[in-house]
Amino acid sequence: MTKGQARVAGWEEGKALGNFVPGGQIGGDIFRNGDDLLPDVDGRTWHEADIVLTDAMKRSKQSGTRLYALGAGSRTSRITIMRPFISCQIGSSEMEVVVEGDQIVDVDKLHRGLAEALDFGPYYGRNMSALWDRLTTDVERPVDLVWRHSEQSRRAIGEEAYGRIRSLLLEVEEMDLARPADRRFTVRFE
């Protein structure tokens, strides 16, 4: 069902669809491509759907795959499956957030991905101060953040920006050392 159809059933952004439409999945909405994630094709429209998700929790709290289909009238001529560049996996006791560094092309994309994965909400400022505030006060623990391909991110976003973000994440981890192990933020760079 589309987001519009889900809203008619009582669903709200940030809520688990299964609370309103048991077994429901959202898909078919027009993908606006504001981040130039996919190529522009004149006269054609990309549609999106999240797949391999559970309807029991909101999207930002689970990893999954997004399906993009390029439509031409009533026919679909191209389908692209993309893995999220930042995913969130919730285990029995902790949340693992994986940053796919080989897909981070700028700092803004990193902020947008972290905001979605960690549910920063609509008023997140996408800057270092806002990131510090969210990570130190709003993100429920425990969280294990894994930044894969971090060297590729460093090259893509620049040494200075990467260094500031890395330092901030390590500082949050250090601050949490005073907490019990099951109430900590941890970070690994791979």
Image (cartoon, rainbow, N blue to C red):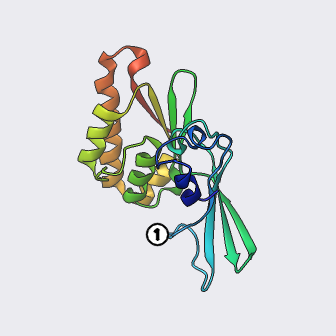
Residue 112 against residue 22 in the figure, above or below? below
**Can I make out residue 171 in this image?**
no
| Residue sitting farthest toward the left | 129
Looking at the image, which residue is at 26% across and 39% down?
Answer: 133
| Residue 5 in which image quadrant | bottom right
Front-lying residue, 71 or 157: 71
Residue 147 against residue 158 in the figure, above or below? above
Percent of width and height locating residue 2: 60, 59
Q: Residues within 10 Å of mark 1 (few under 14, many from 20)?
A: few
Front-lying residue, 12 or 10: 10
Whether residue 27 sits left or right of residue 147 in the image: it is right
| Residue sitting farthest toward the bottom | 42
| Residue sitting farthest toward the top | 180
Front-lying residue, 112 or 56: 56
**Three-letter code for the amino acid on which mark 1 is drawn:** Gly
Residue corresponding to mark 1:
34
Residue 73 against residue 159 in the figure, above or below? below
Looking at the image, which residue is at 37% across and 33% down?
Answer: 139
Looking at the image, which residue is at 30% across and 16% down?
Answer: 178
Task: Locate the N terminus and report the quarter of the image it occupies.
Answer: bottom right
**Can I make out residue 72 in this image?**
yes
Front-lying residue, 12 or 154: 12
Looking at the image, which residue is at 55% across and 57% down?
Answer: 3
Element at badge 1? loop
Percent of width and height locating residue 173: 35, 29
Residue 10 against residue 67 in the figure, above or below? above
Percent of width and height locating residue 188: 46, 34
Labels in figure, total: 1
| Residue 72 in which image quadrant | bottom right
